[in-house]
Structure formats: C-alpha cells, structure tokens
Image: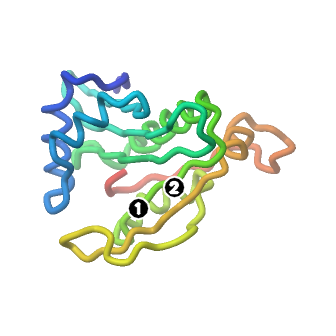
Amino acid sequence: MSMRVATAADLDAIMALEHASFPTDAWSPAMMREELDSPHGWYVVVEETGSLVGYAGLRAVRGARDADIQTITISEAARGRGRGRALLSALLDEAARREVHDVFLEVRADNPVAQKLYLSEGFVEVGRRPRYYQPDDVDAIVMQLDLRGWSARRAGDPASGISETPTTSGKGWC
C-alpha cells in the first residue's frame, strides 16, 4: 500500500471509485475537480499494485480553527485492512499541521463500521441531520473531534490519560 497526495490526474480513478461506493449519491466530476483544485482542500489516495483503492479529503481553510473531513472511501476489495484508518490519520495529521482545533464530519447512520472507526479515534456525536443522504433518506450523524486531544493521545502524552491509540477492524466504507 502506498499513500500520496491526490492530483487532477487521479480524477477519473477517484470518480470510478466514487460511483462504485456511492451509487445513489456520488459527487459529480465537477464537484470533485473543484475539491482537488481548492487551496482549502487536501486529498490523498491509496494505491496498491498501481491501482487506486481509496481516497480521502479534508477541507481546512488556512488559519481557521475547524476543518471538515469531506470523504473517506475504500474499494470494497480493499476494506477491513486498516486503509480507512490510515487515510483518516493522514487527514488528521494535515489538519494538525494547519493548526486546526476541531475536526467535523458527517457519517451515514447506516454505516456502523465507519462510525466505530471515528468513535475509536475520539470523535463524538454532536448532532444529526435527518434524511441528509438523498435519495436514500438516511440520516447523517455529525461528529466532532478535539484535534489537540487526539494529537496528545496519539503521542502517548501521559497528561491525556490515554497511552495508546485504539484500533478496530471490520468491513464497510472504511
């Protein structure tokens, strides 16, 4: 597995995975291109044997105290082997480099694997958006992470009260 910053040249492969993973509510190529080109966006891809098997994106305006995880997507064949956690960690590391304090995301209420991943990293539910994902009528769970606390836990800071990063595995979007 190799991870690198996404480029515009990755758009077709990202969109193929986007449509395979989210057949009813995939982003459009124009939306994804805007994300890849935005100075506020930061996208990474995971490749295995020359094929893109995952991608993830962060929106973090330089100087802002909060950021949003836009997406984390892993191909069905590559799920359950830590790639989602690796992508999430890369996004959170970039948010920390940008001196963000809080990271937000929305996760589908019908995606317990992703919810478990986010909870294991310290995200907490702060709200719900009813029927957010259309046309499926699925609620979005809004989650928030105190990034400074996450960074301290990850570094094994005794003051954080947690000395190691929890892990999970399983199948799902992450």
The residue drawn where x is 24% and y is 39% is 32
**15 or 165, nearer to the observer:** 15
State if disc 2 and disc 1 touch (CB < 8 Å). Answer: yes
Q: Is 136 located above or below residue 102 in the figure?
A: below
Of 75 and 9, nearer the camera is: 9
Per the image, label 2 sits on a secondary structure element best described as: helix
Residue at x-position 21% and y-position 49%: 27
In the rendered image, which quarter is residue 98 located in?
A: top right
- Above or below: residue 47 compared with residue 74: above
Amino acid type at circle 1 is: Val
Residue 160 at what x, y percent from top left? 81, 47
Tell me where residue 16 sits by quadrant. Answer: top left
The color scheme shown is rainbow
Image side of residue 11 versus residue 116, left or right: left
- On screen, 158 above or below 110? above
Residue 151's spot in the image, x, y percent?
68, 38
The kind of residue tagged 2 is Tyr
* CA distance for labels 1 and 2: 9 Å
Going from N to C along the chain, the mark reached first, 1 or 2, is 1
The crowd level at tag 2 (other Cα within 10 Å; few <14, some 14-19, many 20+) is many
Q: Give the x, y percent position of residue 38.
A: 35, 31
Where, by quadrant of the figure, is residue 46 drawn? top left
**SS under mark 1:** strand
**Left or right of 148 on screen, residue 26:** left
- Name the residue located 45 percent from the left edge and 68 percent from the top edge: 141
What residue is drawn where x is 56% and y is 48%?
A: 103
Q: Residue furthest right?
A: 159
- Identify the residue position indicated by label 2 in the image: 118
Q: Nearer the viewer, mark 1 or mark 2?
A: 1
Residue under numbered circle 1: 107
